[in-house]
Amino acid sequence: MGSYIPSSEAERREMLEALGMESVRELYKDVPESVLLDRPLNLPEGLSEMEVRAKLEDMAKLNRNYRIILRGAGAYDHYIPSIVRYIPAKEEFLTAYTPYQAEMSQGVLQSIFEYQTMICELTGMDVSNASVYDGASAAAEAAAMCRDRKRSVTLISETVHPDVINTVRTYCYGANAELKVVPAKDGKTDLAALKEMLAADTAGVIFQQPNFFGLFEDAEEIIAAVHEAGAMAVMSCNPIALAVMKTPGELGADVAVGEGQPLGLPLGFGGPYLGFMATTQKHMRRLPGRIVGETVDSRGGKAYVLSLQAREQHIRREKASSNICSNEALCALTAGLYMATMGPDGMAEVARQCMAKAHYLASKLVEAGCRLEYSGRFFHEFVTRQENCREILGALSDEGILGGLLLPDGESILWCVTEKASKEALDEVADIVKEALA
């Protein structure tokens, strides 16, 4: 930080004298000698700023930068307006730390309040928290929201992102709760299997819309079946798709969760991201994390407060159902800036372009010799099956194109197209695939 000034040797000596000590080692006199470091750290000698910059630039050259990215699977290459990158980089915002003495941090609280408001508008829900670590932990926290003394089993669709399934499984294991996976059929949740698995001990059902394979699930039928069994429905959503599809609120879901990375956060080699969570007023006291509210101060002016932290680990810690203790404020600020910059029309346009371009590439790949694995409606991801998958991806990589994700069977590829891909680029991809299949 630009305002950070380390203490000088003279200042450290002055502090030791005030404590009546001769050295820093005296501060740690109760620490056994056997665990104290008695030799220099195994670190290289220090470098000048110019030398460090040159060294880092050399390291950066080892990275592979692709001119076209056609891989999604949970992390998406969207265009980020310059203002969305600029404002969060300002020194006064550049911290993700939780605001203790919260009401002293009116600017941070306002940014969280605006973010929460926009997430509620995007999901059609009543209340949102100040975000959790990522989309996977959001789904796991939602599973905890659904459990009670009589209902402890969580069902999750096989068509949910595999990393999310594994994260929810880990959380359930830690809570001594059971997780069951609902099988897929033709790339979507098997509704008949779901109905058979729903039981009196089912707490909640998690499904993804659109799902891991890019397909739109039969959300209304899933939610109706879940509610008929007396359980809660958790809908994991792509926030860009929410700009054009029916919201969880419209569909009657109890909890909406998702990965907020598409909302202005760069791919960043996997992070930092943020998980968004929203729910109905009925369930708001089960939400983890912070909820910021708007009120008036003693002078009648607008003010922001932390209005609810019902599941925090530091409140009745022995009974807490969540250990979330950060609000991902910097990422939430970025997501809020992206939504405010784009507006409803801008986000809808991004969604329409993603969908249109994905369908265009799918048709071109079919012409090139690939076969669509599933026939259902899809958003901006789809699966193709073909021979020579590795050769295809290698040929694309040679031309500076990151192809789709090779699925575990080794015979199919999950493609993703965002608004950043041009028609010319997609035509080039199709030509390379056609040549690789020839």
Image (cartoon, rainbow, N blue to C red):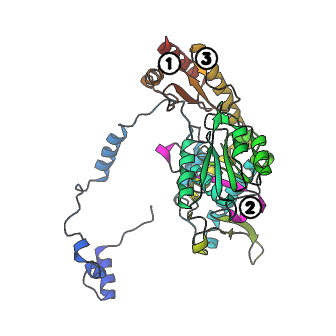
Say if residue 326 shows up in the picture: yes
Query: Quick one: SS at disc 3?
Result: helix
User: From what the image shows, is residue 423 above or below residue 219?
Assistant: above
Pick the residue in front: 146 or 404. 146
Left or right of 264 in this view: 294: right
Say if residue 333 shows up in the picture: no
Query: Quick one: SS at disc 1?
Result: loop
Residue at the spot x=59%, y=64% of the render?
322
Mark 3 Cα shell of 10 Å, populated few (<14), some (14-19), many (≥20)? some
Mark 1 Cα shell of 10 Å, populated few (<14), some (14-19), many (≥20)? some
User: From what the image shows, is residue 424 above or below residue 222?
Assistant: above
Identity, as a three-letter code, of the amino acid under mark 2: His
Residue marked by disc 3 = 366
Residue 165 drawn in magenta:
no
Q: Quadrant of residue 371?
A: top right
Left or right of 353 in this view: 421: left
Query: Quick one: SS at disc 2?
Result: helix
Q: CA distance from mark 3 to mark 2?
A: 46 Å
Labels 3 & 1 near each other (Cβ < 8 A): no
Upstream in sequence: badge 3 or badge 2: 2
Residue marked by disc 2 = 283
Q: Residue 26: percent from the left, percent from the top? A: 27, 82
Upstream in sequence: badge 3 or badge 1: 3
Residue at the spot x=22%, y=76% of the render?
33
Pick the residue in front: 319 or 424. 319
Residue 387 is labelled as 1
Pick the residue in front: 434 or 173. 173
- The residue at the far top in this view is 438
Identity, as a three-letter code, of the amino acid under mark 1: Glu
Q: CA distance from mark 1 to mark 2?
A: 49 Å
User: What is the magenta range?
Assistant: 266-287
Q: CA distance from mark 3 to mark 1?
A: 13 Å
